[in-house]
Amino acid sequence: VCNLLRAVVDGSLSRFQMDHARSNLIWNLKTREELRDALEGEMRSFSVDRELGSVNVISWNHQEFEVKYECLSDEIRIGDYYLRLLLEEDENEESGAIKRSYEFFNELYHRFLLTPKVAMKCLCLQALTIVYGKCCEEIGPFADTKYIVGMLDRCTDRLERDRLILFLNKLILNKKNVKDIMDSNGVRILVDLLTLAHLHTSRATVPLQSNVLEAAPDMKRESEKEWYFGNADKERRGPFSFEEMQEFWSSGTLTAKTRCWAQGMDGWRPLQAIPQLKWCLLASGQAVMNETDLATLILNMLITMCSYFPSRDQDNAIIRPLPKVKRLISDNTSLPHIVQLLLTFDPILVEKVANLMYLVMQDNPNLQRLYLTGVFFFIMMYTGSNVLPVARFLKYTHLKQAFKSEEAKGQDIVQRSVLGPVLPEAMVCYLENYEAERFSEIFLGEFDTPEAIWSSEMRRMMIEKIAAHLADFTPRLQSNTRALYQYCPIPVVSFPQLDSELFCNIYYLRHLCDSNRFPNWPIRDPVKLLKDTLEAWKREVEKKPPSMSVDDAYEVLNLPTGQGQHEESKIRKAYFRLAQKYHPDKNPDGRDMFEKVNKAYEFLCTKSARIVDGPDPENIILILKTQSILFNRHRQELEPYKYAGYPMLIKTITMETGDEQLFSKTSPLLPAASELAFHTVNCSALNAEELRRESGIEVLLEGLSRCVAVLTASSKPEDMAVQVCGHICRCYSVAAQFEECREKIIELPNIIRDICHILYYGKALPRLASLTVQCVSSFAVDFFLQTHLYHAGVLWHLLVNLFNYDYTLEESGVQASQETNQQEVANSLAKLSLVALGRLGGYSCAAGSPEGESEVETNGGENVGPPPENPTIRKSLAAMLTPYTARKLGTSSPAEVRIKNGERGGVASHSRAAPVNRFINGSLNSAALIKVLKLLNSNSENPYLIWNNGTRAELIEFLEAQQESNIKRGECDKSFGAEFVFSEHGKELIVGEIFVRVYNEQPTFPLEYPKAFAASLLDYVGSQAQYLHTLLAMTQTNKVESQQHAQRLRWAEMALEALRNVIKNNPGSETECIGHFKLLFSLLRVHGAGKVQQLALEVVNTVTSNQECVSNIAESLVLANLLVLLHSLPSSRQLVLETLYALTSNTKIVKEAMAKGALIYLLDLFCNSTHPQVRSQTAELFSKMTSDKLVGPKVRLTLIRFLPGVFMDAMRDNAEAAVHIFEGTHENPELIWNDASRETVSTTVREMMLDHFKQQKDNPDVNWKLPEDFTVAYAAGHGELEVGGVFLRIFIAQPGWVLRKPREFLVSLLETLTELLEKNNPNGEALETVTTAAVCLFSTQTQLADQVPPLGHLPRILAALNHKNNAVPKSSIRLIHVLSDNELCVRSMAALETIGPLMSGMKVRADMAGLACEALNRMFQREQTELVAQALRVELVPYLLKLLEGIGLETLENPSATKAQIVKALKSMTRSLQFGEQVNEILSRSTVWSAFKDQKHDLFISESQTAGYLTGPGVAGYLTAGTGTTVMPSVPPPVDNDIGDQG
C-alpha cells in the first residue's frame, strides 16, 4: 500500500499532480511533499519492524497512520471546509455546492457562538451568510434569528454590524425568519440604521443636465445646532451642532452613558442607545459598506419582507388588519425616517424608497395622512431621471390624502390632489389620466401641448420653490438624522410659462384652440369639458379685482406694513410660525386663522402673476373657441344635451354688436361668439329651438347687418366682418331646417336682403360667398323663402357664379386645395351655386328616388323633405339656362340622401345632426353636377342645347346688368329673367324643348324623354297639316308667294324627319303615333310636296315594326292613301312595298287592301315595272297576302283571274324566279306562256290600274271590285288537255318534269281517268292521253303508286275490264300492268276479284295478252296466294295453255313474245307454296307445256312496249326548266314614264 501511495505521489495520476484551492480541498506542492515524506518515513519504519520480527508475520498498523500537514496548520477549518476559501468563493459557483449543508451550517454557527474574537465572529457570520444563501431551503428556518437581531442592536463594531445585517439579509429568504425579525423589534432597529445615510457626504452627485436638476443652493450649509446632553451634575447643555458633539467625545466630555436628546427623540437616552452618536462616536471597526450601501441593503430587505405579505388576498379582498410588517413600517417611529431618505437625493435610495412606499401604502389605512411626513415635497425635489417608481407611487397616492376637508376639495382633480400646489394643473391631470410611464416621459421632457406644458426650467423652478419651503428643515438632517419634519402647506407655485394660459378640465385652451399646431387633438370627455368650460366662462364673466391687498396680507402674517416689500425668506418664516401655531392638527380651534394665513401667504407668493381687473376678453375668446371645437368634433356625444350657455352667448353678441368700437377692438368676441352659435345649432335640434326661443335669430341678424354694412369689394377674408357674416350664414343654414325657425326667418326680410348683399361681393370673397350660397340652399326648403329670395334677385348672383368654373382644373388630375388655389375656390362656389339653383327651383326632388322623393336628415327630429317645386323660378331658370340645362339641375343633388330619422313634424332629442349643408357638400363631387358646369362653360350644339361664346356672353351681360341695378338702385327685370330669349335661338324650330334641326343632324343623340318628344312632334305636325293642304292647293293655282311660306314648309319637313328619327332610334316611342295615323296618312296625299310625302311614308314605315301601331292603322282605314303612292310617287315604290309587306301581317289590313285595289296596283308593278327589285318585292307581297288564313284564298282566286296559278306558287317559293318566269317564254307540263299572253295581261292590268287610280285619287273611299265572270283571255294553252294544272300532252312528252304538286295531279288524273273508264262511249283520244299520262306518272314517280289503294280507284279500274267498249279494257290493262310493280297495289288487288276480270279483258283484247301476262307474272312473284287461288278458280291455267297452242293469238304480229310472257306467268304460279303442285298437275296433263317448260324465252321479249313511259325521272321543273323550253326576250323592255324607279 505504501509503495502504491508513493507511486501516486511520484506522479502516476495526473489529477493528483494538479494544485487545488477549494473550500473543501487545499492541495499543492507542499502538501504533496509532506505526504511523500510521511509515506517514506512510514515505509522505513515498517521495513525495520519487519526485519526485526522476521520470525512472525508482520502487519502494518494502517488504522492509526495519519499525515499531519504542517502547511495547513494556519487554515481555519470547520467541518470539511476551509473558512478562508469558502468566503473567497463566488456564491454562484456550481463547484461551490456545499455537501451536508445543514450539519456544516450548525458547525459554523457553533464556532460563531464559541469564539470571543470579533474578527472570527465576522468570518463565521460571513460563512453563515454564504451557506444560508446557497442552501436556505435545505437548512430551513433559523431558530436563533431573534438572537442575531439582539446582537445587531447591542454590537458597537461596524464590521460586525454589517456582517450581521448581511446575514439577516439572507435569513429573510425564509418567510418564518421574517416573523422572528418583526417579533424582535428588528424593523425599528433596521430603520434606525437607515437614518445614517444622511451622514454619507462623499456620494457621487447627479450630473447637471437640462432635464436633471440640482436643488436649491442653500441646502449646503453648516450643521444646525440640534443636540443637548446632561453633564455629571445633571445640567442640560446645548444646543450643540453635531461637529461640536464630536469634539466633546474626543475630549472625553461625552461618554457612552451620557444622556443626550435631539428633536425627533421621545426622551433622554444614553449616547450608546442613539444610533447616530453610537455609530459615529462610540463604534469601532471598519465597516464593510458605506452608509448609502447600507441603507440600500436595508431598503431591499424591507421591500422583500413586504412582498411576503400582500395587502389583498387571492380574491382581491383587502386584508385587515394590515400585515404586521407594513404596520411597523407605516408607524410614526419608522415611516418619517424612511421618507426623509428622499432628501439624500441618491438615485438608488430614492428609487428604493418610492418602491417601498408604493408597496406599504397599498390599501393602508394610514395612507390619508402620509402627506404629513412631507413625502410629496421631498419626492418632488428629486433631480434624477429614474422617476418611474416615483410616478407610480404618486399616481396611487396623490388623490388619497386628507390634506383638506372634503368640502374644500370639491370635485376638481387639482383641488383634490396633494400635488396641486406644486405641479401645474395639467401635470396633475396627466398623472391621473395616464399611465405612470407616460407621466414620467412628460415629467422628464420638454412638452408644449394642450394637455401638458412642462419643461426643465419649470421643473427647476418647482424644486427651488419646494427647497425654499423646506429650507429650515433640510440642513438639520445632516446634524440630526432623526429630526422629524413638521408639515406645513406650501403656497401654490406660479409658473411664468403659464401666465397667459387658461386651463380648463385637463386642457390648456390656448393650445387646444390652435388648430394649426394641434389639429384634432383627442378630447377624452367632451361632455365634462363642455360643463367645465361653461363654468369657466361664468367665472370669467363674474371675475372681480382681488379683495386682498399687500398690506392686508402683511397684517395677517404679523409683518410690519409701510416699510416696503419684505424679503421672501422673512415672509416664509412668518408664515411657518403662524401655520404651525394654527394648524388644525395641533389647534382644532385655529382652522379659520390657518386658512387666512394660507391665503395671505399664497397672495404674496403669487402677486407677480398677471392680474386682470374683471373679465379677460382673451380668455372668453378661448372659452368660445373651445366650445366651437367641442360641438364641431363631438356632435354625437353632445347632441342629446341642450346647450346651457345661450343666455351668456346672446348677451355677448348683443353687447358686441352694440359696441361702437366693434371694428377697432384688439380682441373682439363677435367672431368667436357667432361661430359658437353655428356649431351649437349644427349639433342638435334642441339647440336650434333654444336659440329661437332666446331671440337668437334676431340678435344674429343685428350682428349680420352691422357687418354687411362695412363689406366692400376690397374686404379681405381675414376681416372680422367677413368672418362674422360667414358664421351667421352657416347658423341660419342650419336653423332653416326647422319650421318654427323658418317662420321667424320669414318674419325678418332683412336676412335675405343681407344675404344678397354678401353674394354681390362673391368675386372678392369667394369663401364667404360659398357659405352664403349654402345658406340659400337651406332656405330653399320653404316655398315662401324661395319666393322671397327670388324677388330679392338671388338668381342674378347665383347664375353669375356658374361661369367662373374651370373644368380643365377638375380634369387635369392635379391635386388642388382651396387653401392654395383660387380657381379651386371659384369651382367650389360654382358647384354650390348650381346646387342652390336646383333647390330653389325644386328640381332636387327629381333626384331623390324612383318615386321622386328625397328626404334629408337634419338636426335631430325634423325630416326636411325635398324642396318644393317653384314654377316661377323654374320658368326663369329655363329661360336663362335653357330648359335642357335647367332640367339637369335636378340631377346635381345626391340621390342617395334618403334618410328617415325620427318622426315627421316632431323634434327628437337623441338624433344626430346632419344638416342640409353637409347634404350639399356631399353632392359637390357629383358627376352630374360637374357635367352641367362643364356644359355651361364650353361650346355645345346638341338637340337640346345650342350654347357657344355668343349665348354665354349674352347671358352674362344680362346678369351683370341686373346684379348692378338690383344692388345699387333696387330695380331689376320685372319678369326676373323669365322672358329672356337668346337671339340665336329665335331662328330655330324648337319642338318639345328640342332644336329640330340639330336633332336631325344628330339623330342618334340619346334623348331624355323620346316619347314626349314624339308626341310634341305629332302635335306640331298636326297643327301644320291643314296649312300644308291649303298651301299646296294655293300653289297649284299660283296664288302664293313661295318666299313667304317656304319656311313653314321646311319646318314641317324637319318635324317629320325628326319624328322618323326619334321612332327609328328610340324603340317604344312609336306607340305615340297611335291615334295619329289618320294625320300621318293624310300627309301622303299632299301631292306636290314630295318630300313631305316621302318623310310621312318613312314615318309610317318605321312604326310598322310595332304590332300595336299596325293594329291601329288597320282600325284607321287609311290604306288607300298609301296605295295611291304606288303610282303617284314612283321614287318611293320600294318603301311603300316594304311598308305594305309589314302591314299585311294584319288580316284586317289585307282585307282592306283587297277592297281598296291593292292587287291591281301590285299587279301593275309586277307586270309593268322596269325595276327588278320592285317586281320582286311585289311578288313577295303577293306571297304574304295569299298566305293569310282568312283572306289569302280570296287573294289567290283573284290573282288566278289574271295569271296562271303557277305564278302564285313561284312567288311563294322564289320571288325573283317568279319575275323571270313572267318575262320568259315557257312550254312545259305546267305552264304555256309567251309574249302574246304576257302583253295581254300587262295591258289589261295597266288599264284597270289607271282607271282605279283616277277614281281613288279623287275619292279615297272608292273600292275596287272585279266582275264575277272576269278573266284575262290570254291565248297560250288554248285547246290543250289540262288535268290538275298539268298539260297532259306536254307531260307525256316530258315525263321527267318535276311537278309542283304531284299528289294533287295524281288525284285529279285518276279521277279524270275513272270517269272516262265508266263512260259508255268515252272520247278515245282523251282516254288514250289520260291513260298514257297515268302510265308515265307511275313509271317516273313509282312512290305515287302507294297513294292509289287509299284513293279507292282500283275496284273501278278492275270493273272497267268488262266494259263493252274494247278501248276501255285496254286502258285498264295498261294501268294494272304499271301498278303491278307496286306491292301495296298488288296486295289490294289480291283482296279484290282481279284475275277473272283481267282474263276477260285478255279475251276481249288479245293484243294486250302479253302485257296482262307480264302483270300476272309480277303479281304471282310477290307470293300472293289469294291471286293463285283466284287463277285456279277461274281456270286461268287452261286458258293460258290454250293461248300457248296459238288459239286466240292469230291476229298478233309477234305471238312469240306473248307466249314467252305466258310461260313466265305459268312458271310463277308453279312456285306457289300452297297451290304450286295443283298448277303443275294441270300443266303436266297438257301436251303443249312440255314444249315450253324447259326453255327460256327471254329473247322473244322486246322492251319496246314500255319505251316512252319507263324512262327515269328528270330534273326539269317550273323553277328549273330544261334548256330550250324558255325563250328570254332578246330586246330591252319598253321604257315607261317611271321617274326614279330605282328608288
Image: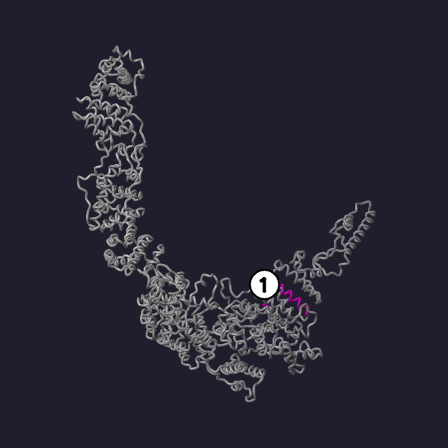
Q: Residue furthest left?
A: 1320
Q: Can you identify the residue that label 1 sits on? A: 176
Within the image, what quadrant is residue 746 found in? bottom left
Residue 1196 colored in magenta in the image: no
Q: Quadrant of residue 1346?
A: top left
Q: Is residue 798 above or below residue 1265?
A: below
In this view of the protein, which residue sits in the foreground, 592 or 963? Answer: 963
Residue 1012 x/y as whole percent: 30, 58
Residue 645, how many percent across, how many down? 41, 75
In this rendering, the answer to whether 247 lies above or below 783 is below
The x and y percentages for residue 1230 are: 26, 33
The main secondary structure of the magenta stretch is helix
- Specify the quadrant of the image occupied by residue 757: bottom left
Residue 1284 location (% of width, % of height)? 23, 33
* 11 in relation to 553, above or below: above
Q: Is residue 1345 visible?
A: no
Q: Is residue 179 magenta?
A: yes
Residue situated furthest top in the rendering: 1487
Mark 1 Cα within 10 Å, few/some/many (few <14, many 20+)? Answer: some
Q: Amino acid at mark 1?
A: Lys
Is 599 located above or below residue 1190 in the figure?
below
* Residue 693 visible in rendering: yes
The local secondary structure at tag 1 comes to helix
Labels in figure, total: 1
The residue closer to the viewer here, 828 or 1208, is 1208
Tell me where the magenta segment starts and ends, as one range.
158-183
Q: Residue furthest bottom?
A: 562
Q: Nearer the viewer, residue 1185 or 910?
A: 1185
The structure residue drawn at horizontal position 47% and vertical position 61%, both measured from the top left corner, is 813
